[in-house]
Image: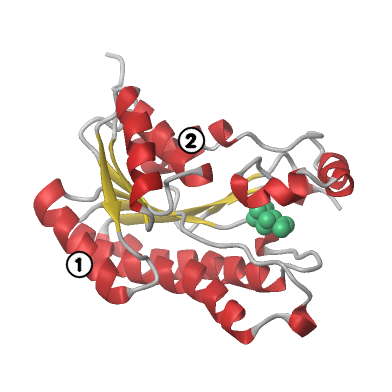
């Protein structure tokens, strides 16, 4: 007898933070294509509504849930609303984050705190609220978003790199505490992808040439290539993978 499709997410519900555009939207689309109901998140109701309408037009079961991932009160209210009014969260993708580039000696203190809050504290507070429900059900999938800048850095992005390194060990710590309770917590570490966050880099001929030469596959990633990876980590296909950082980077971190 053929086994059921291990990548099928039918009957599952996924909350993806920061999913109005870019990597978050692409992962939400991929999870929806695998059968999941998706809950999109962002702070701007207009762009969130447009993103939800786009996915609904493709046949996705989609709900928009605007809340500020950096506000613990907003997070708690949103997760309780989702669990009670929309449905249980089976899959959480902590994608929300910001990028601020600048020389470290001139980097504003408040911007550094925004970077840590936007990436690390938000992943902690959203995951904590969702995990309390997942633990009660004895199952759940959490996917954090790291970067090729998790273990290496480059000039002008030290705060971002520090935040992503923290996400990596937060992923491992979540697995340590929550894998025994039936949860799976992993991270995706994207290489250089064509996103709005990277528009300025893509438009810079020197930086574009650097990415193409530094990446053995010789190109930027396309956000559509990330959806299937999120499906893999959200599905039964990764049933014995926990605490893992999965690099999706065209071999960027495999070489010097
Ligand atoms: C940068 C980029 C990177 C990428 C991505 C790479 O300024 O170097 O914004 O941070 O966005 O994180 O994995």
Crowding at label 2, few (<14), some or many (≥20) Cα neighbours within 10 Å?
many
SS at badge 1: helix
Compared with 63, 141 (above or below) is: below
* Residue under the point 40% across and 45% down: 47
Report which residue position mark 1 lands on. 77
Where in the image, quadrant-wise, is ligand 1 located?
bottom right
Residue 28 appears left or right of 145: left
Give x and y (percent) for residue 133: 19, 61
Rendering quarter of residue 213 = top right
Give x and y (percent) for residue 110: 57, 83
* Residue under the point 32% across and 42% down: 49
Compared with 160, 54 (above or below) is: above
Q: Quadrant of the N terminus?
A: top left
SS at badge 2: helix
Compared with 42, 71 (above or below) is: below
Mark number for residue 227? 2
* Residue under the point 23% across and 50% down: 89
């Amino acid at each position: 007898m053929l086994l059921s499709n291990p990548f099928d997410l039918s009957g599952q519900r996924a909350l993806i933070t920061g999913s109005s555009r870019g990597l978050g939207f692409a992962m939400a689309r991929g999870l929806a294509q695998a059968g999941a109901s998706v809950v999109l998140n962002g702070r701007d109701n207009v762009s969130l509504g447009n993103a939800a309408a786009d996915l609904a037009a493709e046949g996705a079961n989609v709900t928009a849930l605007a809340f500020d991932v950096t506000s613990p009160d907003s997070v708690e209210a949103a997760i309780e609303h989702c669990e009670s009014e929309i449905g249980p969260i089976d899959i959480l993708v902590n994608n929300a984050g910001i990028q601020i580039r600048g020389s470290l000696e001139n980097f504003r203190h408040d911007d550094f705190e925004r970077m840590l809050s936007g990436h690390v504290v938000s992943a902690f507070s959203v995951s904590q609220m969702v995990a309390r429900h997942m633990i009660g059900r004895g199952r759940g999938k959490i996917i954090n978003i790291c970067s090729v800048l998790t273990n290496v850095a480059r000039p002008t992005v030290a705060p971002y790199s520090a935040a992503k390194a923290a996400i990596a060990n937060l992923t491992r710590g979540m697995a340590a505490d929550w894998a025994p309770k039936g949860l799976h917590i992993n991270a995706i570490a994207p290489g250089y992808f064509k996103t709005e966050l990277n528009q300025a880099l893509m438009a810079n001929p020197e930086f574009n040439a650097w990415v193409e030469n530094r990446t053995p596959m010789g190109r930027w990633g396309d956000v559509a290539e990330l959806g299937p990876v999120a499906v893999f980590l959200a599905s039964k296909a990764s049933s014995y993978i926990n605490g893992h950082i999965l690099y999706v980077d065209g071999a960027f971190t495999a070489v010097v």
